[in-house]
């Protein structure tokens, strides 16, 4: 066992007040509550507490100085000191190891009180849920209901523009607190099902719109779908596959700053051979080369 005077950093002639001050200084630095997870600090605190337990007791200190007991408080060989109930033990294993310190130092007493208050006021646990929604619900917003494991329900307001994997926090809708604290929150993670013809980039919506060769060549007015309903779209003459038209404000419906919808034209031939079209094409001699820019 190490010398208790060395552990506390005091001389064998130190006064009781000097011993107490040395212990308080080391305990403030090494106390396990102030060093969570630090095994070295915990072991040092045990040594410091044991040394203080011995040297702060005038009788134990006298007997140690006289060589009657060792640094652990145990009798020297062939003797047993009946008044020492924990020979070789550590006072850190009970509250007694730093009871005098706690009584004499308000900082630790206040620390313990704060910990107790914090435990009583701790909130309940957060609960986690998953909600799968349609593409258009994410674009325009919606109200959904989540069924809880115990049979209750949560009403969830989906804001316009929510993105894949985002979570919504429902304050106070989690588990109740074990003490006096507030309930936890409910965290709802959202996944978005894909749409069969809309896609999304940020707050903008994209749509590939098939058009006939006649509509592309001569122009037309067509009904084009948007997240908020179909609108009339004017196809300019001479349009081609890849031509892009913009519908302002028809994208993600964020209040005050909605995105846009971009319509990409895709010229589509009839699914079955069309006799009139074939006859026209057979007699038509194009006066342009669509591949001229690809010449080697």
Image (cartoon, helix red, strand yellow):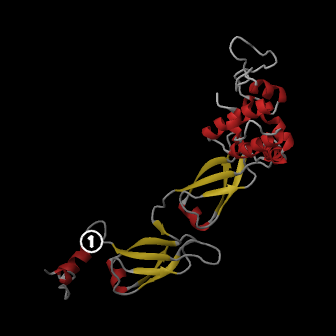
Q: Is residue 261 left or right of residue 19?
A: left
Measured as percent of width and height from the top left, residue 28 is found at 74, 46
Task: Locate residue 213, reporting x and y percent.
Answer: 32, 78
Where is 132 relative to 150, above or below?
below
Q: Residue furthest top?
A: 78
Between 201 and 288, the residue placed more toward the observer is 201
Residue 27 position (above or below residue 134): above
Dot 1 corresponds to which residue? 274
Q: Nearer the viewer, residue 223 or 145?
A: 145
Q: Quadrant of residue 46?
A: top right
Please tell me which residue is depicted at 78% across the width and 19% down the height of the picture: 85
Total marks shown come to 1
Q: Nearer the viewer, residue 154 or 181?
A: 181
Name the quadrant of the C terminus: bottom left
Give the image location of residue 51, x and y in percent.
73, 33
- SS for callout 1: loop
Does residue 294 appear anywhere in the picture? yes
Q: Residue furthest left?
A: 296
Q: Would you place residue 90 above or below residue 262 in this image?
A: above
| Residue at 80 percent of width and 45 percent of height | 108
Say which quarter of the image contains residue 271. Answer: bottom left
The quarter of the picture where the N terminus appears is top right
* Residue 288 placement: quadrant: bottom left
Return the residue nearer the eye: 169 or 147: 169
Left or right: 179 in relation to 129: right
Give the crowd class for mark 1: few <14, some 14-19, many >=20 residues within 10 Å.
few
Regarding residue 178, the answer to whether it shows in the image is no
Left or right side of 283 for 212: right
Residue 244 position in % (x across, y down) = 41, 79
Image point 77% across, 46% down: which residue? 122
């Amino acid at each position: 066992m190490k010398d208790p005077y060395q552990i506390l950093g005091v001389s064998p002639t130190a006064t009781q007040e000097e011993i107490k001050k040395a212990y308080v200084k080391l305990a403030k630095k090494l106390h396990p509550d102030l060093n969570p997870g630090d095994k070295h600090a915990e072991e040092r605190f045990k040594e410091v507490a044991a040394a203080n337990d011995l040297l702060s007791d005038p009788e134990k200190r006298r007997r140690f100085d006289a060589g009657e007991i060792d640094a652990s408080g145990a009798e020297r060989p062939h003797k047993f000191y009946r008044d020492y109930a924990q020979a070789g033990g550590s006072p850190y294993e009970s509250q007694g190891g730093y009871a005098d310190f706690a009584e004499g130092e308000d900082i630790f007493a206040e620390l313990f009180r704060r910990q107790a208050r914090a435990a009583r006021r701790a909130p309940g646990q957060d609960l986690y849920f998953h909600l799968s929604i349609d593409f258009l619900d994410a674009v325009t917003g919606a109200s959904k209901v989540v069924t809880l494991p115990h049979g209750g329900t949560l009403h969830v307001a989906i804001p316009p523009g929510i993105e894949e994997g985002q979570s919504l926090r429902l304050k106070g809708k989690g588990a109740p607190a074990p003490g006096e604290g507030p309930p936890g929150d409910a965290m709802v993670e959202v996944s978005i099902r894909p749409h069969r013809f809309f896609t999304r980039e940020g707050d903008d919506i994209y749509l590939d719109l098939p058009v006939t060769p006649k509509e592309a060549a001569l122009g037309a007015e067509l009904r084009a779908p948007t997240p908020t309903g179909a609108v009339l779209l004017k196809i300019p003459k001479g349009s081609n596959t890849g031509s892009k038209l913009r519908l302002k404000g028809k994208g993600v419906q964020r209040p005050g700053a909605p995105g846009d919808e971009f319509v990409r034209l895709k010229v589509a031939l009839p699914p079955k051979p069309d006799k009139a079209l074939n006859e026209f094409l057979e007699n038509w001699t194009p006066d342009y080369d669509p591949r001229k820019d690809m010449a080697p």
